[in-house]
């Protein structure tokens, strides 16, 4: 029997692919990375504070700018940077040379609007609104016989552009407390139009509870779900996972301890879920922009520009910190307040697609990332 939820998801995926590309001329299955390589893109929506994730612990400017918000117990990496203590599994990956942090990265949009920055990052052009589909979707559309999967509630912009991109979402994004449902029941019962719909919702919630589907769907569960759908010879080669809650204007320390713990658990879940295919996997963790170099008056940070990214996976040439670090001195800061970006995120994405998925440079600079010939792919990200 046809699963109605799967039918809905395939329909939404088709909507996301209305601007699908035809196969890039000459891009055969072998040329698109004949080996069963896997790529998972994780987007942390809300602007993750890279200076809290990867603090330059020995930097006097960092300690001056952050004050009490400075991370004092970071796990040392290269003598200059450390990793937040909640990222213990990631630190283990670094020791195994399977984690590569990239400093001072940002999309080409250098303002501070979440919406515009995410749009620019996902559409793969030089500006917000530059395309109605996404760079991942266009990449899938340009690769022969390969598929993608987005673990999300609706098809993200990044995955639009291919009819071979599928959407998968859990039954419920978050649990609904029983006490709240009980309080709402008398209100809906008084309305003859809404009462039947509320009763149906209650019944569906009871069904979800009985089969274990009900509950929170946090980043670790999302990344585990991605691994399940990306494992095996016929599985999706490209995946997308998103997470929210990274906008930390106040009370940042406690909030990011929890969020970094979830990110760390997500990396572990994907590593364990992929099994032997981890050796051919790359995970790219990105966010739309960084935070201010200085802490604000609410024990948090405000919207910035330069951020950080992480590459993880058995195919990554890790155990080092990549990127061009500009420093945090007053003259080095962007507009006197933000970490200055020195690497365009498109260069990072291009480097991964070229080396890992064997996407030809011509496709990268004209179709997948339009008009980006001047943005050269980052080299040396992956094992030779």
Image: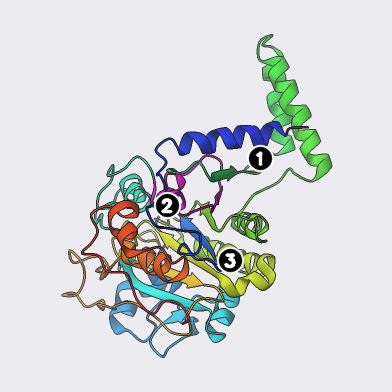
Q: How far apart are marks 1 and 2 (CA)?
A: 33 Å
Relative horizontal placement of residue 337, taking residue 57 as reference (left or right): left
CB contact under 8 Å: marks 1 and 2: no
Q: Residues within 10 Å of mark 2 (few under 14, many from 20)?
A: many
Q: In this view, which residue lies farthest toward the front?
A: 26
Identify the mark nearer the N-term, 3 or 2. 3
Name the residue tied to disc 2: 142
Is 152 inside the magenta-drawn segment? yes
Q: Who's the residue at 64% across and 70% down the image? A: 277
Q: The residue tagged with tag 1: helix, strand or loop?
A: loop
Q: Magenta span has 120?
A: no
Residue 351, quarter of the rendered image: bottom left
Quarter containing the N terminus: top right
Q: Mark 3 points at which residue?
A: 36
In this view of the protein, which residue sits in the foreground, 3 or 111? 3
Q: Is residue 50 left or right of residue 188?
A: left
Extreme-right residue of the structure: 210
Q: Is mark 3 on a helix, strand or loop?
A: loop
Task: State the residue position of label 1.
Answer: 172
Q: Residues within 10 Å of mark 3 (few under 14, many from 20)?
A: some
Q: Residue furthest bottom?
A: 79
Query: Which one is in front in this view, the residue at disc 1 or the one at disc 2?
Result: 2
The residue stretch that appears in magenta? 134-160
Mark 3 or 1: the one toward you? 3
Q: Where is residue 149 in the image (x, y as percent from the top left)?
A: 56, 50
Q: Could you say where residue 342 lies in the image, as x and y percent from the top left? A: 25, 71
Label 1 Cα neighbours within 10 Å, binned few <14 / some 14-19 / many ≥20: some
């Amino acid at each position: 029997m046809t699963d109605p939820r799967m039918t809905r998801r395939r329909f939404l995926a088709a909507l996301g692919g209305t601007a699908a590309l035809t196969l890039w001329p000459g891009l055969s299955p072998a040329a698109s990375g004949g080996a069963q390589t896997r790529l998972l893109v994780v987007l942390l929506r809300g602007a993750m504070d890279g200076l809290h994730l990867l603090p330059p612990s020995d930097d006097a400017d960092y300690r001056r700018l952050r004050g009490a918000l400075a991370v004092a117990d970071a796990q040392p990496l290269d003598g200059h940077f450390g990793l937040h203590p909640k990222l213990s599994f990631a630190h283990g990956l670094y020791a195994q040379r399977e984690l590569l942090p990239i400093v001072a990265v940002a999309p080409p949009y250098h303002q501070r609007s979440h919406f515009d920055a995410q749009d620019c990052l996902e559409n793969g052009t030089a500006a917000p609104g530059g395309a109605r589909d996404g760079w991942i979707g266009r990449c899938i559309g340009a690769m022969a016989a390969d598929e993608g999967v987005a673990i999300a509630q609706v098809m993200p912009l990044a995955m639009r552009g291919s009819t071979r991109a599928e959407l998968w979402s859990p039954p419920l994004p978050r649990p609904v407390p029983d006490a709240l449902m009980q309080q709402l029941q008398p209100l809906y019962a008084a309305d003859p139009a809404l009462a039947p719909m509320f009763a149906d919702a209650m019944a569906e919630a009871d069904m979800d509870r009985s089969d274990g589907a009900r509950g929170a769907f946090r980043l670790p569960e999302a990344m585990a779900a991605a691994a399940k759908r990306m494992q095996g010879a016929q599985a999706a080669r490209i995946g997308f996972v998103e997470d929210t809650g990274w906008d930390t204007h106040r009370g940042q320390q406690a909030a990011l301890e929890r969020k970094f713990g979830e990110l760390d658990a997500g990396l572990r879940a994907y590593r364990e879920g992929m099994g032997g295919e981890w050796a051919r996997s790359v995970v790219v963790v990105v966010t739309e922009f960084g935070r201010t170099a200085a802490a604000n008056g609410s024990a948090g940070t405000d919207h910035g520009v330069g951020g950080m990214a992480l590459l993880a996976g058995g195919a990554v040439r890790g155990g080092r910190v990549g990127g061009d670090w500009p420093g945090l001195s007053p003259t080095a800061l962007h507009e006197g307040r933000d970490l200055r970006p020195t690497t365009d995120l498109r260069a990072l994405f291009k480097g991964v697609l070229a080396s890992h998925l064997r996407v030809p440079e011509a496709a990268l600079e004209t179709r997948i990332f339009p008009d980006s010939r001047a943005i050269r792919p980052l080299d040396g990200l992956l094992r030779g």
